[in-house]
Image: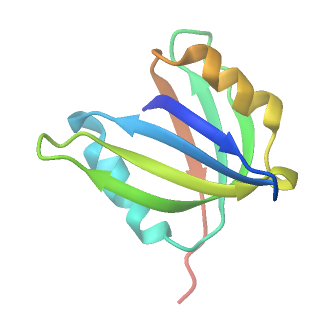
Amino acid sequence: MYYENHRVKKNQSVTLTLSFDYDQLPNAIELLQALGVSISCAISFVADKPEIKKLGSISVDTIKIKHDGSGIIQFESMTPFLELDILNELSKHEDELISLYCKYTLEN
């Protein structure tokens, strides 16, 4: 996945947008089952040593898939539930491949 942008609003809500290529489509589709569920999220920068950094708690807001299989995922959260320094660090790695690690529990 690749960092696209993030926005922090006055009400402390945060939107994080990541893009993905066709080869990452199965992972993006897997996140559909996490709609409306709180996700513990961590990232690592593939170019760096594989140090995993905890981003915080997010939820999937939007998944858009283009005709070529690439797309974007928008996540929503609030500033108290995110590590803003890690989020800001993402913006410095805009063109680099990042790994996204998500952990969530589905209720029956």
Residue occupying image coordinates x 37% and y 44%: 72
User: Which quadrant of the structure image shows residue 54?
Assistant: top right
Residue occupying image coordinates x 20% and y 46%: 66
Q: Is residue 107 left or right of residue 2?
A: right
User: Which quadrant of the structure image shows residue 92?
Assistant: top right
Q: State the residue lying farthest toward the top.
A: 48
Q: State how the image is colored.
A: rainbow
Number of numbered discs present? Answer: 0
Observer-nearest residue: 74 or 37? 74
Residue occupying image coordinates x 56% and y 53%: 75
| 85 shown above or below 80 | above
| 16 shown above or below 89 | below
Position in image of residue 61 (x %, y %): 51, 62
Q: State the residue lying farthest toward the right.
A: 80
Quadrant for the N terminus in the image: top left
Observer-nearest residue: 7 or 53? 7
Position in image of residue 79 (x %, y %): 82, 50
Position in image of residue 51 (x %, y %): 68, 21
| 53 shown above or below 67 | above
Q: Is residue 6 left or right of residue 35?
A: right
Position in image of residue 67 (x %, y %): 12, 46
Residue occupying image coordinates x 55% and y 77%: 106
User: Which quadrant of the structure image shows residue 97?
Assistant: top left
Q: State the residue lying farthest toward the front.
A: 10
